[in-house]
Image (cartoon, coloured by chain):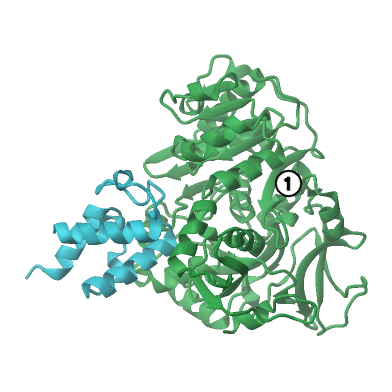
Amino acid sequence: MNDTLATIRKFIFDNFLFDAAEEDLGNDDSFLDQGIIDSTGVLELVEWLEDTFDIAVDDDELIPENLDSVNQLAAFINKKANPEP
Amino acid sequence: MLLQEYLYRTVRKTPDKEVLIYGENHISYGQLAAAAESIAFWINSLELEPGFRGALLTDDPFEYIAGYFGILIAGGVVVGLNSQTSVKSLQYHLDDCGASVLLAHKKFTRYFKPVVRKLNSIQGLAVTGPDPDLAWAGEIGQADLTELLDGKKAGSDSVAMSFRTSCDLAQIIYTSGTTGKPKGVMLRHSNLVANITSIVSYLHLSDKDRIMAVLPFFYVYGNSVMLTHIAVGGSLVVNQSFLYPNVILQQMVEHEVTGFSGVPSTFALLLNRSSLAKFSFPALRYLTQAGAAMSPALAVRLEKYFPGVAIYIMYGQTEASARLAYLEPSELHNRPGSIGKGIPGVCLSLLDQNGNAVPVGQTGEIVAQGENVMAGYWEQPEESAKVLRREGLWTGDLARQDEDGFFYVISRKSDIIKSGSHRIGPKEIEDTLAEHPAVHEAAVLGVADEILDERIRACIVLKDGCVCVEKELITHCRKELPAYKVPQEIQFFSELPKTATGKIKKTELKSL
């Protein structure tokens, strides 16, 4: 899980926050409320998720509960990788 | 007529009616008017000259709309600023319009704090509370914007209305320039009222209408959506982030919206990255699209998901207070690719560069006449004179007309990039790239994109012996430019294709 969190944080910093300090982004901070990602950024994020974690994101799953913070992303990736039987 | 009279008209009739729904918030017309008057009361205490410029930097709809009408009631001119900004961009806009008042959400402090300190023109600053720490702002008038929105400011029920006429300026909206800095489009109360009257008539808007407002209010399209619905006493359901289309669709159903306005990328996102097929919208009456004509294929897809809903294609520009033409829904399939005809009160013609009408079927520039045409560009008389000529407003859009008088836009004379709901001038991005020490030459242009309509491509020639990668240039742009102006792709060249006179051939670069 820690590896996933670090991978997500690196992607967010590399693509949206650039030279911001590590403490500028908490793992529960909302990307929407903080103005970190715009609508095209969400599409980039989804493409990256699918490529990096080899998962398919359905249109139904494009909701803030899955994608709007580092922790929500990590939980979503975990859920996709380990679907409930 | 003044714009604020629209607000007062509904307050007198139905003060408890909802004007604004966003998140968990439901705001009535009475609350909105009280908040606007409270803001006006505070502004009046600053003793500014009528016609002062009041700027808005907030993505909170209640703050924005109350601030908008508060500035008008106090006799000012509204300057709604793009909340996707940078320190450099904000400084340019506030300085250019000589803003005296800034109403801002606290989340943008990192942008406005360094700018307000530098600019002498700012005499009043109101920031979202509670208790915003504005000690750094020194002697200028300060207020807690949240407190003002409560509408309980002592004495605000007797706010003195500044004397203004419909010929006075109501608003300045900044628009991208292709060759220079953004230009402030000056709109009088009468320009906006004329356009509102026309739009209300052809969209058949009434107080029963409830629009899903996803477009930002600081651009002219969103501004027009806001004003037309307030003018008829309708309601605005606002969610302007558009990060999660499914959330928008859910809100459309939940709040039984009757209308939805978007640009091509809005509809592309709905059709390609949402669960649209799983929703139905029994209350929805109409959709509007501006920014480009609609392809027949897209129209068919939209009609499948929105059966029985009228689809209006519209055309306009900031210089026309928003709207110049629209296509009746019944013509959507008969006139594929058309933007329709002039809206009521607007006369459109197609002229050659000498001002002569072009024959049917031939290409000319769209020139518009109507009460909605702007007063000019703020403090740029030469730029104003280039587009406001004897024949009317020269739009810069090349089009043809069919035998029945319907217009079809063919291309733009300018290099403006249409990306999502943004209109982006390439020059500012090229200048920013050229400031990077490794860059010899930069050309920026829009290339076709399935979702955005156009994405930004930067074509770069590096200085001899310099090494630089894409990420370094993107990071450089990120520091200097608002996010939506940062190129999505960078291509490196040993040299750029040019004409004999040295002009970069952007059309050639687009096709690479």
Q: Nearer the viewer, residue B444 or B389?
A: B444
Residue B97 in view? yes
Q: Give the vertical position of B496 relative to B42 (above or below).
A: below
User: Which residue is outermost to the left?
Assistant: A85
User: Which residue is outermost to the top?
Assistant: B154
The cyan chain is: A
Query: Is B273 situated left or right of B50 in this image?
Result: left
Apparent colour of chain B? green
Q: Nearer the viewer, residue A9 or B53?
A: A9
Q: Residue at x 63, y 17 (%)?
A: B158
Q: Residue at x 15, y 64 (%)?
A: A79
User: Which residue is outermost to the front?
Assistant: B465
Q: Position of residue B490 (x, y in %)?
A: 51, 72
Q: Residue at x 36, y 72 (%)?
A: B277
Q: What residue did someone put label 1 on?
A: B193
Query: Is B428 situated left or right of B408 in this image?
Result: left
Q: Give the vertical position of B183 relative to A47 (above or below).
A: above
Kindly identify which chain the residue marked by label 1 belongs to: B
Query: Is B391 situated left or right of B130 in this image?
Result: right
Disc 1 packing (10 Å; few <14; some 14–19; many ≥20): many
Q: Quadrant of residue B168?
A: top right
